[in-house]
Image: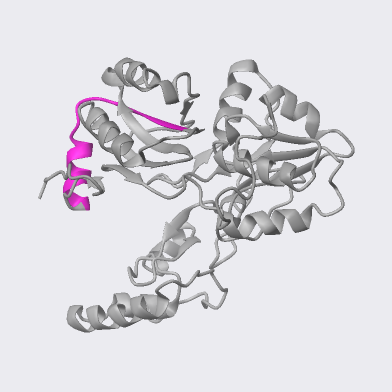
C-alpha cells in the first residue's frame, strides 16, 4: 500500500484503497482548485513525459487523471491552492505546454479526484480512425462566449453538442443537435450524418472543455465543411466568461464533468428527469450493484427506495447474503464485460418490501 511505480512503461498511480484516499482528502487542512486543460501538440516520447509530469505533480500533491500521447495532453486535476502559482509556472515552463489555457471549475469543493494518475495512451481522445486520416491541427474558428451568443441567433446556424447522450441529457444549448452516441468514436460518423447537406452553413460546436470540439472541427473541415466554429474553452469557460462579463447565459441546466462531482450547475434550471419515476432530477449516480455500475439519473426519493440501484434485479442482488452476492456479481460482471449499457424503463415504482 502506498507504493508509487517509477518504472518505465508502467502507469504511475497511488495504490491506496478508495476509502483511505477519501479519509486523507477530507482531512486536508487546505483547499484545492479543480482545473482542466488540453493541447494537441506532438510529443516525441509520451512515456518520458508521463514520468516527468507524475514526479512534478506528485511533489505538489496534485490529484487527477491525465493522458499523454504522441498527439498531446488531456488533463483533469485538482491542485492545492498554496501550490497553484508554482503549478502554473512549472507547467508553462514546458515548451510544449507554454501558455496552455487553464479552465477552472465552476462549482468546486476541491474533492474532484482522490489520486494522481498520469497515463500514456495511443491518443488523448480516441476517434477510432487510423492515424493521419485527417489533420488534427487544422481546426475551426475559436469563438468567445459573446461571439457564441451572437452566432447562435444566426438564422442558418447549426448548433451541435459534441458530447455523449448522458451528458447532454442534463444540460444543453437551446436548439442543439444532440447525438445519441455512447462514445466519441461513435459520435463522429453520427455528427457527419446529422450535418449532411449543411456543409456551407455556420456550424457551432460545443463540448465540456473544448477537446472534443477541436478534433471534430478538424474532422468536419476534412469532409468539406467551410464555416466551422467551436466554443473556446467549452462549457466550463463559457460559464466563467458569462459570469465575469455579465453576458446572457444561453446554456440550460448542468454541465456533466468526469470526476467525482459528475456535474456542475451552469444555470438554475433542471432539464432532465429521474429515470425511475420521471420526477425532475439532474443527479447522476452509478448503480450500487458494482457488477452493474450503470450510470443513470436517480432522484433522492428513488435512491432511498431502490437503495441506489437501477433495477429490481440489481436491488435483489444487493440484498443477497455476502457469499451468494459475490458469486452472482461475478457472473453479472462476466456477462456485462465490454457491453455498452443504457437505462431501460422497466423498473416498477415500488420495490419488494418497499
Query: Please, which colouring scheme is shown?
Result: one colour
Residue 108 percent location from the top left of the image? 41, 32
Q: For residue 34: magenta?
A: yes
Please tell me in which quadrant of the rendered image residue 128 appears: bottom right
Using residue 316 as the reference point, say whether residue 103 is left or right of it. Answer: right
Residue 284 appears left or right of 83: right
Q: Is residue 219 above or below residue 306?
A: above
Give the residues in magenta: 18-37
Return the x and y of residue 247 as percentages of the image width and height.
68, 22
Which of 13/131 is in front? 131
Location of residue 59 (image quadrant)? top left
- Residue drawn 63% across the image and 24% down it: 242
Residue occupying image coordinates x 65% and y 18%: 246
In the image, residue 211 lies at what x, y percent?
A: 55, 39
Q: Tell whether 16 sits left or right of 301.
A: left
Q: Quadrant of residue 120?
A: top left
Q: Is residue 69 above or below residue 182?
A: above
**Residue 344: percent from left, percent from top:** 56, 73
Asked whether the viewer can see residue 354, the reply is no
Amino acid at each position: 500500500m502506498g507504493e508509487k511505480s517509477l518504472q518505465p512503461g508502467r502507469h504511475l498511480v497511488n495504490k491506496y484503497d478508495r476509502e483511505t484516499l477519501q479519509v486523507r482528502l477530507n482531512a486536508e487542512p487546505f483547499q484545492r482548485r479543480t482545473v482542466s486543460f488540453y493541447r494537441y501538440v506532438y510529443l516525441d516520447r509520451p512515456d518520458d513525459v508521463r514520468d516527468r509530469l507524475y514526479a512534478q505533480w506528485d511533489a505538489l500533491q496534485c490529484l487527477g487523471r491525465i493522458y499523454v500521447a504522441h498527439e498531446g495532453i488531456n488533463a483533469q486535476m485538482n491542485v492545492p491552492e498554496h501550490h497553484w502559482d508554482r503549478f502554473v509556472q512549472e507547467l508553462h515552463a514546458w515548451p510544449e505546454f507554454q501558455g496552455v489555457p487553464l479552465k477552472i471549475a465552476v462549482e468546486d469543493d476541491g474533492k474532484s479526484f482522490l489520486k494522481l494518475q498520469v497515463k500514456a495512451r495511443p491518443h488523448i481522445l480516441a476517434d477510432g480512425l487510423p492515424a493521419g486520416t485527417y489533420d488534427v491541427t487544422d481546426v475551426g474558428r475559436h469563438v468567445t462566449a459573446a461571439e457564441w451568443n451572437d452566432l447562435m441567433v444566426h438564422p442558418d446556424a447549426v448548433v451541435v453538442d459534441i458530447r455523449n447522450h448522458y451528458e447532454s441529457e442534463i444540460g444543453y444549448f437551446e436548439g442543439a443537435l444532440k447525438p445519441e452516441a455512447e462514445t466519441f468514436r461513435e459520435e463522429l460518423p453520427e455528427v457527419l450524418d446529422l450535418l449532411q447537406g449543411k456543409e456551407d452553413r455556420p456550424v457551432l460546436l460545443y463540448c465540456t472543455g473544448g477537446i472534443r470540439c477541436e478534433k471534430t472541427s478538424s474532422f468536419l473541415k476534412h469532409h468539406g465543411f467551410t464555416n466551422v466554429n467551436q466554443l473556446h474553452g467549452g462549457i466550463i469557460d463559457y460559464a466563467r466568461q458569462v459570469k465575469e462579463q455579465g453576458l446572457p447565459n444561453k446554456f440550460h441546466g448542468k454541465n456533466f464533468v468526469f470526476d467525482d462531482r459528475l456535474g456542475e450547475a451552469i444555470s438554475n434550471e433542471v432539464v432532465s428527469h429521474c429515470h425511475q419515476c420521471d420526477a425532475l432530477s439532474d443527479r447522476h449516480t452509478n448503480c450500487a450493484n458494482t457488477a452493474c455500475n450503470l450510470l443513470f439519473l436517480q432522484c433522492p426519493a428513488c435512491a432511498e427506495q431502490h437503495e441506489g440501484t437501477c433495477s429490481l434485479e440489481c436491488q435483489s442482488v444487493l440484498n443477497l447474503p455476502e457469499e451468494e452476492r459475490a458469486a452472482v456479481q461475478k457472473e453479472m460482471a462476466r456477462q456485462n464485460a465490454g457491453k455498452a449499457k443504457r437505462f431501460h424503463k422497466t423498473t416498477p415504482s415500488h420495490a419488494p418490501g418497499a
